[in-house]
Amino acid sequence: MGIDDMSPAALAEELGQRLKQARLNQDMTQLEVARRAGLSRKVVLNAEKGRVQLEALVAIMMALNMTSQLDYFLPPPMISPLQLSKLQGKQRQRASGQSTSRQSTSGQSTSEQSSADEGETLEW
């Protein structure tokens, strides 16, 4: 039976067996993995049986230096050219120029600043 034909429970068991094999290949005990992962030994034992919460699975993978395997397990999704063009269509291309009396860094409004730039004296 191939992986594509497995039930969710059978696939979880297979993942657990692979975790166990990775641990054994690194000559680590369940207790060592548990300590590195900040988990109990029982959580590691259950993970190797396919009964594990996602956060604990990630912690175990980190303890086994296997997080790079996630790129093979779930590669980052690629953005299709169509999606990319839609996203780019929503990006601003230029300012509208329709703001009302914005404040410049000097604390003056832009209309006051342009008057001051022309040599006029401002009265407060």
Image (spheres, helix red, strand yellow):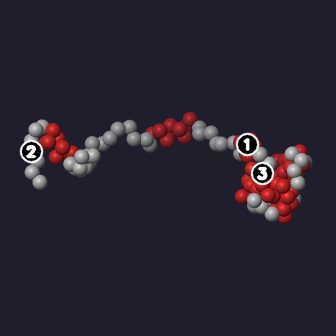
Mark positioned earlier in the residue sequence (2 or 3): 3
Give the answer, above or below, for where 10 lies relative to 73: below
Amino acid on which disc 1 is placed: Ser
Is 61 situated left or right of 30 in this image? left
Q: CA distance from mark 1 to mark 3?
A: 12 Å
Query: Residue 50's x, y, as percent?
Result: 84, 58
Amino acid on which disc 2 is placed: Thr
Give the answer, above or below, for where 35 lies relative to 94: below
Residue receiving disc 1: 68
Residue receiving disc 2: 121
Residue at coordinates 77% horizontally, 51% vertically from top-left?
63
Q: Quadrant of residue 91?
A: top left
Q: Quadrant of residue 36?
A: bottom right
Residue at coordinates 16% horizontally, 46% vertically from top-left?
112
- Residue 43 seen in this snapshot: yes
Contact between marks 1 and 2 (CB within 8 A): the answer is no
Amino acid on which disc 3 is placed: Ala
Q: CA distance from mark 1 to mark 2?
A: 65 Å
Residue at coordinates 53% horizontally, 38% vertically from top-left?
84
Residue at coordinates 84% horizontally, 62% vertically from top-left?
41
Q: Nearer the viewer, residue 113 or 32?
A: 32
Query: Residue 27's x, y, as percent?
Result: 89, 47
Q: Mark number for residue 63?
A: 3
